[in-house]
Amino acid sequence: MKQEQAAPEVTLTINPIEDICQALFETEESAKKSAARKTVGAMTQRPWQQLPSRLRSAIRSDVGHLADHKTREQIVALGYSVEILGQALRDLGRKIA
């Protein structure tokens, strides 16, 4: 009798935080990046220090690029909450109008 070998199972790990980070680190504007900003903006109930460090880095990177060309109100309109934006700017040592 021949024994049939079971095909190896493929497991797919989904990490939504990593997807958000990758979208925020992108240099091009996209719908994915816009959705990531809005998702992060909704995380205001979670203290900044409790966010994963890679996510904080991605937010700082995106906010740093935006702060070069946009006002505080324009960045909030893109989806970031006032709290998240304020903390990212403090971490960057930057102030914008």
Image (spheres, rainbow, N blue to C red):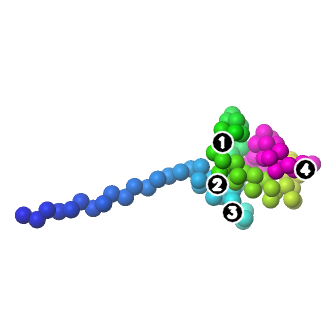
Q: In the rendering, at what x and y percent does residue 53 appear? A: 66, 47
Residue 33 position in % (x across, y down): 68, 57
**Cα–Cα gap, marks 4 and 3:** 22 Å
Residue for point 72% across, 65% down:
28
The label on residue 26 is 3
Q: Earlier in the sequence, mark 3 or mark 1?
A: 3
| Amino acid under disc 1 | Leu
- Of labels 1 and 2, earlier in sequence is 2
- Which numbered dot is residue 51? 1
Amino acid found under the numbered disc labelled 2: Cys
Secondary structure under tag 3 reads loop
Q: Position of residue 15 (x, y in %)?
A: 53, 51
Q: Is residue 95 left or right of residue 11?
A: right
Relative to residue 14, is residue 26 drawn left or right? Answer: right
Distance Cα–Cα, label 4 vs label 2: 23 Å
- From the viewer's perspective, tell me whether residue 49 is left or right of residue 69: left
Q: Which residues are magenta?
A: 75-97
Q: CA distance from mark 1 to mark 4?
A: 23 Å
Q: Amino acid at mark 4?
A: Ile
Q: Are marks 2 and 3 in contact (CB under 8 Å)?
A: no
What residue is disc 4 on?
96
Asked whether the beta carbons under mark 1 and mark 4 sit within 8 Å of each other, the answer is: no
State which tag comes first along the sequence, 4 or 2: 2
Q: Secondary structure at mark 4?
A: loop
Q: Residues within 10 Å of mark 3 (few under 14, many from 20)?
A: some
Q: Which residue is mark 2?
A: 21
* Mark before the other along the chain sequence, 4 or 3: 3
Residue depicted at 63% across the width and 45% down the height? 52
Q: Decide if residue 76 is in sight here.
A: no
